[in-house]
Image (spheres, rainbow, N blue to C red):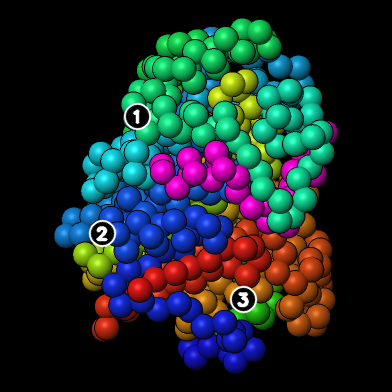
Amino acid sequence: MTADPRWTTQRPPVIGARAMISSGHPLATEAGLRTLRNGGNAFDAVVTAAAVIAVAEPGTNHVGGDVFALCLPAGAADPDAINASGPAPAGLTIDAFDDEIPPHGINAATVPGAVSAWQAILDRYGSIGMADALAPAIEYAQHGVPVDPDTAQAIANAGPALAQHPASARSFLPNGAPPRPGSLLYQPDLAETLRQIARGGADAFYKGPFADALVRTSARDGGAFTPRDLAAYQCEVLPPLRTYYRGLEVLEQPLPSRGFLVLEQLNIAEGFELSALEFGSADVLHLMAECKKAAFADRLAHVGDPKWNDIDINRLIGKEFAAQRRMSIDPVRAAQHVSAGDPSAVGGDTTAVSAVDAAGNAITFIQSVFTSFGSCYVVPGTGVLLNNRMCGFSLDPASPNVFQGGKRPIHTLNTYMVRREDQLVLLGSSPGGQYQVQTNFQVISNVFDHGMHWQAAIDAPRWYHNEETGDLMLEDRFDPAVLTDLENRGHSVRREVPFSVYSRAQGVMLDPDTGARIGATDPRWHGQVLGF
């Protein structure tokens, strides 16, 4: 179906003949492009960009965060899935919590996985060392990084929580107040930690001064981190999950990522002729939202850390199970409560970076501390802000995602690749918590069901279904009559401002005919895409 002209965009994608990198921050994209121009490959460029964005945009990600990535070396049959999600401290027990897991402080954090991922990517696929990859980030941390308006506002919003911890205030509240847009933010402690990693690799982080500092401050502040929690950590390299959507192969992150939800939503949607329906119509929005509800109900009922949970994930992303779930969808009425399916009855805040280089190496990568400023806890003397991934656990004893020491929570982080007849055509990801998998589902459908070009697919208005409130949130660019129609179908519709910042997609498309690298970035944030 030809794209409706209402959903085209005046923002053309960026096209490069040889290489392309897209990220959520201009300074990170520029550093990655510089690496590509100096002879580095896509993997080198993404690690460089990831380190810079940890310095430049600390509210969304940091060295104390986690990483998921799909890495496809040129000529490889399949990508590797990098899973750098850390576990809870092994000695932490559920008795440490009352009615909820704290959003801030030392007991909000799991073992940070990002540095292990950087090391694994460079060791396996890179052409430069850690010192070269981290050099731009060290420069910005030591000599100051310009504060953009979004980061200034994020620091101001998190200011009261950051002020509770002296090391956090030292890092992000210079002179006791949030920095102004355009001012320089200096992070000398972080610069020194990055230098240690540059010299000694991941071991300098997990077995060196940072680990010592984390264990020391953890004991002081009522945490449970031990040297073994850090020294034993190693990111995983796993096969990706996959399904086929209208003849296209879609690859995603394995558990404990929520990436399987993108595949399950696509599988359920495949039974509906979305391409025959008008983009932005009540019919399309209703069906896609109901697909989302079904998939999310399955996550809550069945999915936890695969090391602790024996669910067969291939059943959840299988076509037979999707057909079962599709039968539960009323094509004209919204479900007020969605029960999980039975897979046993069938057979077997964040930043995104993507890059493709001249040789055809490709990587889509996502890095996060979870919510804005994560735990708001900077490890004293290190400049490292810890994540608050512990909030991803449930305290319900019946949940497969219930907290336990040494276990990993289910992660919102996910990245995807799409291939046609074994040829890579699209790779991307999006920050946005519970909305990440919903965004990726919509963007893929925009391209392959509605014929949008890559930038238009990202610019197009989005819907989001909030699993806590049950609201169907729609950007206020859809036809008002469509919103009324959805309300009449039983949806609890909440209007959002245009270009609402619940997700911020990035990625690269490859033209199979010309070989061009086509980059796009979300207007909902200050991302940038560059190529040559």
Q: If you read the primary sequence from the N terminus, does the residue marked by circle 3 or circle 2 appear first?
A: 2
What is the distance, in whole Å, between disc 2 and disc 1 at their CAs? 22 Å
Which label belongs to residue 460? 3
Q: Amino acid at mark 2?
A: Gly
Instruction: Give the magenta range.
Output: 134-161
Q: If you read the primary sequence from the N terminus, does the residue marked by circle 1 or circle 3 appear first?
A: 1
Q: If you read the primary sequence from the N terminus, does the residue marked by circle 2 or circle 1 appear first?
A: 2
Local crowd size for mark 3, using a 10 Å CA cut-off: few (<14), some (14–19), many (≥20): many
How far across and down, in percent of the image, does residue 460 sit?
A: 61, 76
Would you name the residue on which mark 2 appears?
39
Left or right relative to 528: residue 159: right
Asked whether residue 182 appears in the rendered view, the answer is yes
Q: Amino acid at mark 3?
A: Ala
Which label belongs to residue 199? 1
Q: Dot 2 lies on which element? A: loop
**Splitting the image into 4 quarters, where does residue 435 fall?**
bottom right
Residue 181 located within the stretch drawn in magenta: no
Magenta span dominant secondary structure: helix
Residue 146 located within the stretch drawn in magenta: yes
Task: Name which residue lies at 69% across and 60% down.
Answer: 501
